């Protein structure tokens, strides 16, 4: 009894404090939760979503979960506590996230997922994801062509908890495994990390000096691998990445990495905010919850048009 | 009175315990009847799914929807939306390019059977120049067959891996049932006829058609 009263009082005081601290015209809040901004891809998402939210008159709360499902759950609580009107989320695990998004839904807050999908429908309002599989197929087709359909290669895989690591790897093999003369000598995870890819590549190269190509699950790992190859004077090794970062663009235009696959991260994040806005203001859900956005191959022919995860015309 | 209530409660509790006990002892532990995949979902069998709908749904749909290549492609270049309404999949993903059902009939003027992603270039209008490039496997690109079908929806699949494997299963089935039986030698100059689908994509020299049915005529 006593405890309840104390909580009620505290809550009342809190409301009062909030009421005085916040101006009456405070804008509605949209929470934007992504993995760490160390990877420019996630930063582009956050920047794109935040810009669109502000443009539409919202306040933005930008948070990072560092691919930790527990932290993500806490951040969802924060968004609920702050009374966010919508959550834009690049999530921390296809299974682990379902409960967190359900929690937001139960609190009356719609979630709009970007980049990574979850293994449930009807929980989030929208899941706008890059067609990573289609993108991986594009990257692999280019890789196969560059390799001349034969030779030894290495695959660097992303973080296991991220659905897209598995999707991309499957997409690569979907294409590459049709060519029996292409032989994968080793497949290792470098957890999306540039430094980890560098050290992994160093030791892979020592054990397998006869490699002809490296196909990487993302651009940061491709950058790390290429740096290790360059340091070992093996710039002849073909490297293909995924994401379409400016770093890899610069490497492609200067004759380093051969290709990458652009995910429209910026456009995707903005589209999610537009759909959130439509939901908040007009109570309108997108026609389909799961929306796939196709990826685009970036190589020497179009790399110069790439800027912050978008192709200029 | 209060005593009686307590007694009643106790009695009910005892009865319940006895019932539960009886219930439990009546149970027999049975092994799980069917081996299930890790996440307890029924196993996803894309190849079987495609096999089941190929003759009954896929081929009839493509045949009914397809237009002659020259007509489809001319309209696709000038008015993609109109071409989409007529020959495309109207229920496609909003952000995806159109995929059209087509009939390609003409003369093979070039073939690349060195690559495992073998193709033949077809002249459909008799001007001696290739108009379409047809994939003849065994390795095939894209998911045009899947994407041409209005009864296949991404939202019906657990995730994009399943959706993609379903797409690949169409190519695999076309290869197994049709394309692997086609001749590979001396293709130039022969007549060819197929029903299939293609997706409008940038940066291609020729539209890339994935056939679901194909015939190649005798050597000229």
Image (cartoon, rainbow, N blue to C red):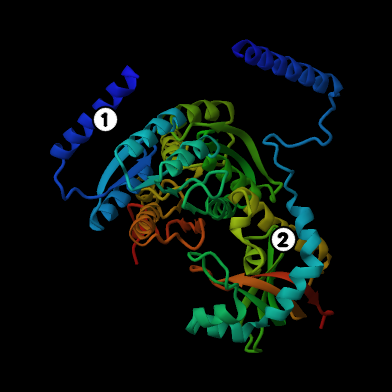
Identify the subunit bearing mark 1. A
Q: Residue furthest bottom?
A: B126
Q: Residue furthest front?
A: B1
Label 2 CA crowd tier, 10 Å (few <14, some 14–19, many 20+): many
Residue, disc 2:
B170
Q: Nearer the viewer, residue B197 or B153?
A: B153
Give the x, y percent position of residue A178.
Answer: 70, 51
How far apart are labels 1 and 2 at the CA level? 59 Å
Residue, disc 1:
A11
Q: Quadrant of the N terminus of chain B?
A: top right
Q: Is residue B79 visible?
A: yes
Q: Quadrant of the C terminus of chain B?
A: bottom right
Give the x, y percent position of residue A207.
Answer: 58, 26
Q: Is residue A37 visible?
A: no
Label 1 CA crowd tier, 10 Å (few <14, some 14–19, many 20+): few
**Residue at (28, 42) in percent of width and height:** A61
Q: The residue tagged with tag 2: helix, strand or loop?
A: helix
Give the x, y percent position of residue B124.
Answer: 66, 84
Q: Nearer the viewer, residue A191 or A8?
A: A8
Give the x, y percent position of residue B211.
Answer: 71, 70
Is A149 located above or below residue B220 in the figure?
above
**Residue at (84, 66) in percent of width and height:** B181
């Amino acid at each position: 009894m006593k405890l309840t009263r104390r909580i009620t009082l505290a809550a009342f005081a809190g409301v009062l404090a909030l009421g005085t601290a916040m101006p009456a015209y405070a804008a509605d809040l949209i929470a934007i939760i992504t993995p760490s901004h160390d990877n420019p891809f996630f930063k582009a998402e956050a920047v794109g979503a935040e810009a669109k939210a502000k443009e539409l008159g919202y306040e933005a709360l930008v948070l990072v979960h560092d691919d930790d499902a527990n932290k993500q759950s806490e951040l969802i609580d924060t968004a609920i506590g702050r009374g966010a009107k919508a959550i834009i989320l690049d999530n921390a695990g296809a299974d682990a996230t379902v409960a967190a998004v359900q929690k937001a839904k139960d609190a009356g807050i719609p979630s709009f997922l970007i980049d990574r999908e979850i293994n449930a429908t009807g929980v989030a309002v929208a899941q706008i994801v890059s067609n990573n599989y289609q993108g991986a197929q594009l990257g692999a087709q280019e890789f196969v062509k560059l390799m001349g359909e034969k030779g030894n290669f290495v695959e660097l895989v992303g973080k296991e908890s991220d659905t897209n690591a598995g999707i991309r790897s499957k997409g690569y093999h979907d294409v590459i495994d049709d060519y029996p003369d292409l032989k994968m000598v080793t497949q290792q995870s470098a957890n999306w990390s540039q430094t980890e890819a560098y050290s992994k590549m160093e030791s892979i190269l020592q054990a397998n000096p006869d490699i002809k190509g490296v196909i990487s699950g993302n651009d940061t790992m491709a950058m790390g691998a290429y740096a290790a190859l360059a340091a070992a004077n093996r710039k002849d090794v073909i490297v293909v990445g995924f994401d379409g970062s400016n770093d890899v663009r610069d490497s492609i235009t200067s004759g380093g990495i051969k290709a990458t696959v652009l995910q429209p991260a910026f456009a995707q994040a903005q589209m999610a905010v537009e759909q959130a806005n439509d939901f908040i203001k007009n109570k309108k859900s997108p026609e389909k919850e799961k929306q796939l956005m196709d990826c685009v191959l970036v190589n020497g022919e179009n790399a110069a048009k790439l800027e912050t995860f978008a192709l200029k015309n | 009175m209060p005593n009686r209530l307590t007694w009643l409660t106790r009695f009910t509790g005892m009865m319940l315990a006895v019932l539960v006990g009886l219930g439990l002892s009546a149970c027999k532990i049975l092994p799980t009847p069917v081996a299930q995949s890790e996440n307890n979902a029924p196993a996803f069998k894309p190849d079987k799914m495609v096999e089941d709908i190929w003759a009954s749904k896929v081929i009839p749909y493509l045949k009914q929807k397809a237009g002659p290549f020259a007509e489809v492609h001319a309209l696709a270049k000038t008015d993609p939306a109109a071409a989409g309404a007529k020959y495309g999949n109207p229920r496609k993903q909003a952000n995806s390019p159109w995929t059209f059902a087509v009939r390609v009939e003409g003369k093979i003027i070039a073939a690349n059977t060195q690559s495992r992603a073998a193709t033949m270039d077809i002249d459909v209008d008799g001007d001696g120049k290739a108009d379409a490039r047809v994939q003849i496997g065994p390795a095939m690109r894209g998911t045009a067959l899947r994407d041409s079908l209005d009864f296949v929806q991404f939202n019906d699949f657990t995730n994009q891996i399943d959706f993609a494997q379903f797409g690949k299963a169409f190519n695999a089935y076309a290869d197994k049932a049709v394309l692997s039986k086609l001749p590979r030698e001396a293709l130039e100059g022969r007549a060819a006829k197929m029903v299939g689908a293609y997706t409008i994509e940038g940066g291609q020299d020729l539209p890339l058609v994935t056939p679901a049915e194909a015939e190649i005529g005798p050597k000229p």
